[in-house]
Image (spheres, rainbow, N blue to C red):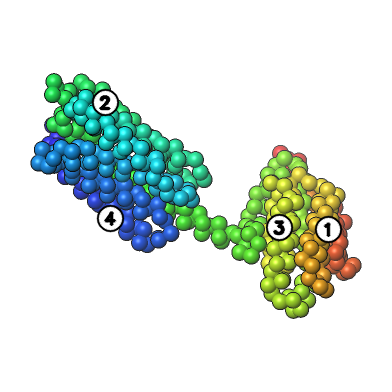
């Protein structure tokens, strides 16, 4: 049988090491307050373990009543940590419920004097806190490490609940004790669990930082739309999907007319506001599956899946009208800024995004040459390249 004193020391050492790891990671990334809350959870767990280990050497109310209450409150802080990671404010109502119920119950002689009942109740409350934290962990974004943490928490909760029948089975007439065969494996599992959770929390924070960096690399800072790279990546996928389905894909290229004059006359803040107006108009008008990006400066592009040229022309005309109304709503004297658009469509898998974008650019030049504020559609009829047509016939 594993010596209880040795396991108490191992559990404390494991907890302290995890606390130091979490504090170090927080020092490297001060924006992740959740790491502090997990560290607080483990720190309280370590303090409570010391108090419980000193049972018999210190007053019972301090070792059992206060010690277990600290353990329950610390476990509840994991729920707080997950909520903080999810962007919510820290709240202590839920973590306080378990300790308060525990302290009240300990004042009842039938409960406070029954070691078996105390261990069972403490185990049940602890398991419930881990399940609640696991539920909160999987209720947000698609970070892969979330599911791993939730699974580990659920497994740990299940193992805690499995102690209960073992405790009843091993209980003596004087009640269950920490000298039973159940305690050594339980303490070892807890020590391993703490290390795993600390590692996974650090991994989760790292994963989110990487996701934010990827998002920033694909996002236009001024408008919040996808940048040129994001547009080409998303549009390439759209073209490939529609090519497999033999459905049309249309590209619209927009350019703000006389934008340089707006910047020169009214200043860059007004110019930036005008660009944001167009981005907002486009984002509000387009469908969820449409792709939009700012290619640079005052140029934008839109990829419309399963959309014909005439349909895209109508979309472009509506968007240009909404943008013109938005500029007028600024009520800035003499501020005039319209948009021109070029539309190009393909219905075959032979044409790449670059091909169609080139035709849309040519149509855009025609629209601007006619004075701007209008839409021009590419007259080119796209046909499969000979090699693609031959491959299709062979298939």
Q: CA distance from mark 3 to mark 1?
A: 13 Å
Q: Position of residue 271 (x, y in %)?
A: 72, 71
- Which image quadrant for residue 155? top left
Pointer 2: what residue? Answer: 164
Q: Position of residue 375 (x, y in %)?
A: 85, 59
Q: Earlier in the sequence, mark 3 or mark 2?
A: 2
Q: Is residue 56 visible?
A: yes
| Relative horizontal placement of residue 84, taking residue 320 as reference (left or right) | left
* Residue drawn at (68%, 58%) of the image: 293
Q: Earlier in the sequence, mark 2 or mark 4?
A: 4
Pointer 1 local density, CA inside 10 Å: few below 14, some 14–19, many at least 20: some
Pointer 2 local density, CA inside 10 Å: few below 14, some 14–19, many at least 20: some
Q: CA distance from mark 3 to mark 4?
A: 46 Å
Which numbered tag is attached to residue 144? none
- Quarter of the rendering occupied by the C terminus: top right
Q: CA distance from mark 4 to mark 1?
A: 59 Å
Q: Position of residue 165 (x, y in %)?
A: 26, 22
Asked whether the residues under the numbered discs 3 and 2 touch, taking CB atoms below 8 Å apart as contact, a structural biologist would say: no
Q: Position of residue 80 (x, y in %)?
A: 40, 46
* Residue drawn at (19%, 33%) of the image: 183
Pointer 1: what residue? Answer: 321
Q: Earlier in the sequence, mark 4 or mark 1?
A: 4
Pointer 3: what residue? Answer: 280
* Residue drawn at (48%, 56%) of the image: 210
| Relative horizontal placement of residue 386, taking residue 35 as reference (left or right) | right
Pointer 4: what residue? Answer: 20
* Residue drawn at (24%, 38%) of the image: 68
């Amino acid at each position: 049988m594993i010596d209880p004193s040795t396991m108490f020391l191992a559990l404390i050492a494991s907890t302290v090491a995890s606390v130091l790891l979490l504090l170090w990671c927080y020092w490297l990334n001060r924006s992740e307050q959740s790491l502090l809350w997990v560290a607080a959870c483990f720190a309280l767990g370590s303090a409570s373990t010391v108090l419980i280990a000193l049972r018999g050497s210190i007053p019972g109310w301090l070792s059992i009543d206060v010690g277990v209450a600290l353990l329950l409150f610390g476990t509840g802080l994991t729920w707080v940590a997950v909520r903080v990671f999810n962007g919510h404010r820290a709240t202590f109502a839920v973590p306080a419920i378990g300790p308060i119920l525990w302290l009240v119950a300990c004042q009842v002689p039938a409960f406070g004097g029954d070691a078996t009942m105390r261990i069972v109740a403490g185990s049940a409350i602890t398991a419930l806190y881990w399940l609640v934290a696991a539920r909160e962990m999987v209720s947000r974004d698609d970070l892969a490490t979330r599911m791993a943490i939730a699974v580990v928490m659920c497994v740990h909760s299940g193992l805690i609940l499995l102690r209960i029948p073992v405790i009843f089975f091993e209980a003596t007439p004087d009640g269950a004790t920490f000298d039973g065969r159940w305690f050594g494996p339980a303490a070892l599992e807890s020590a391993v669990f703490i290390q795993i959770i600390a590692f996974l929390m650090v991994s989760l924070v790292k994963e989110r930082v990487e996701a934010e960096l990827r998002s920033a690399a694909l996002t236009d800072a001024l408008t919040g739309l996808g940048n040129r790279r994001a547009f080409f990546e998303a549009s390439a996928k759209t073209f490939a999907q529609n090519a497999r389905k033999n459905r049309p894909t249309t590209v619209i290229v927009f350019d703000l007319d006389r934008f340089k004059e707006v910047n020169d006359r009214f200043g860059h803040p007004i110019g930036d506001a005008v660009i944001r107006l167009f981005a907002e108009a486009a984002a509000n008008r387009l469908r969820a599956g449409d792709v939009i990006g700012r290619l640079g400066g005052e140029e934008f592009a839109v990829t419309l899946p399963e959309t014909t040229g005439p349909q895209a022309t109508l979309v472009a005309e509506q968007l240009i009208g909404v943008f013109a109304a938005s500029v007028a709503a600024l009520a800035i004297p003499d501020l005039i800024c319209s948009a021109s658009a070029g539309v190009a469509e393909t219905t075959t898998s032979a044409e790449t995004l670059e091909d169609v974008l080139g035709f849309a650019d040519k149509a855009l030049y025609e629209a601007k040459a006619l004075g701007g504020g209008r839409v021009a559609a590419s007259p080119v009829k796209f046909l499969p390249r000979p090699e693609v047509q031959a491959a299709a016939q062979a298939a």
